[in-house]
Each structure stands twice: as structure tokens, then as C-alpha cells.
Amino acid sequence: MQQKTKILVAEDDLQLGFIIKDNLEEAGFQVVNCPDGEAAWEYYQKANPDLCILDINMPYRDGFSVAKKIRQKSDITPILFLTAKSLEEDKLKGFEIGADDYIVKPFSIKEVIARIRAVLRRAEKDVPPQYKDARLAVDFADMRVTCSDAARPM
């Protein structure tokens, strides 16, 4: 059984967050909605989601600062901004920070799902390879090395 793609949604409008979460889950994703930027950053650090959807105007920590923190930790986690901020300067700032896409409210949930799938397809191609043999496994994406027999020197 294939594991569902884990998506972090950071949306402070609880009703809109519920609608997004419900529709994304119906499309086959595993979704957690965080009601503010601080909760989103805490969840990101614990869960390492496959994709992040961030509103910009949120309490405690705005979406731009959350995206900056994510980019400091990972340059491969896809980030989509889903926001009412429609000025060109805001869009450019979002892409400069490291966004993979920028969607302006109001939006079509079908378009959001299509954009998520497109970004995830591109991200799959960018994932570093893994190496595995009888004793050693190297996961370049997670920067993790495991050895089946740690007592023996290599």
C-alpha cells in the first residue's frame, strides 16, 4: 500500500481551512490544517510534510516567514502560497523566498489540486537517489544513513 502524500495547510480562516482540508483529503491526500504560522512551523518540524500550502496573512508568524524557515531547513519541500495578496510585488517576494507556486484567492479547488499534483510530479524528479546494499542504506533526501550491522566497522 502506497503512503498518502502529507500536506501541511496553514490557513487562519477556519472555515476555508476546513474546506481545503476536506477537498484535499477527498482527492487522496493526508492533510493537517494549522490555524496560524507558529503552529504551521511547529508541525513542519515534527512531521516533515511532503508539500506546504501557506496563507500569507496569519497570526503569530506570516506565511513569508514560515516559508523562509522551511527553506532554511529544506530546499526541496514544495511550497505553494494560497493567499488574498494579489499584488505583483507580493507574488515576486513569494517566488524569491522559494515558492513553487502562488495562487490568489478566490480560487478553484480543482485548480489547486491540479497545481499540487503538478508540483509533486516535478518534485519527484528532483528527489536525490537512494543507495542500498546488504549493510548500508543512504537516503539523500532525508540525509540519513543506516547500517544493518553497526558493530562492525566499515
Image: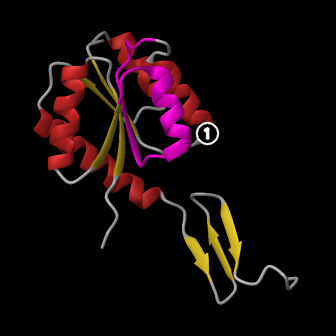
For the residue labelled by badge 1, is the local secondary structure a helix, a strand or a loop?
helix
User: In the rendered image of this protein, does residue 62 appear above or below residue 99?
Assistant: above
Residue 26: horizontal and vertical position, in percent?
Answer: 14, 48
**Residue that lies at the very extreme toward the bottom in this rendered image:** 134
Residue 120: horizontal and vertical position, in percent?
Answer: 33, 51
Please name whichever residue, 139 or 118, is drawn nearer the observer in this view of the structure. 139
Q: Is residue 68 visible?
A: yes
> Where, by quadrant of the figure, is residue 125 drawn?
bottom left
Residue 91: horizontal and vertical position, in percent?
Answer: 36, 19
Q: Which residues are magenta?
A: 34-59
Q: Is residue 75 visible?
A: no
Q: How is the image coloured?
A: secondary structure
Q: Tag 1: Cα neighbours inside 10 Å, few (<14), some, or many (≥20)?
A: few
User: In the rendered image of this protein, does residue 37 appear above or below residue 132?
Assistant: above
**Residue that lies at the very extreme toward the right in this rendered image:** 153
Residue at (54% x, 62% y) in the render: 128
Residue under label 1, please give it.
73
What amino acid type should be assigned to the residue bearing mark 1?
Lys
User: In the rendered image of this protein, does residue 147 appear above or below residue 31?
Assistant: below
Magenta stretch holds residue 105: no
Residue 76: horizontal and vertical position, in percent?
Answer: 51, 47
Residue at (30% x, 12% y) in the render: 85
Please name whichever residue, 21 or 106, is drawn nearer the observer in this view of the structure. 21
> Where, by quadrant of the figure, is residue 14 drawn?
top left
Residue at (65% x, 58% y) in the render: 143
Where, quadrant-wise, is the C terminus in this rendering?
A: bottom right
Residue at (20% x, 19% y) in the render: 105
User: In the rendered image of this protein, does residue 146 appear above or below residue 70?
Assistant: below
Where, quadrant-wise, is the N terminus in this rendering?
A: bottom left
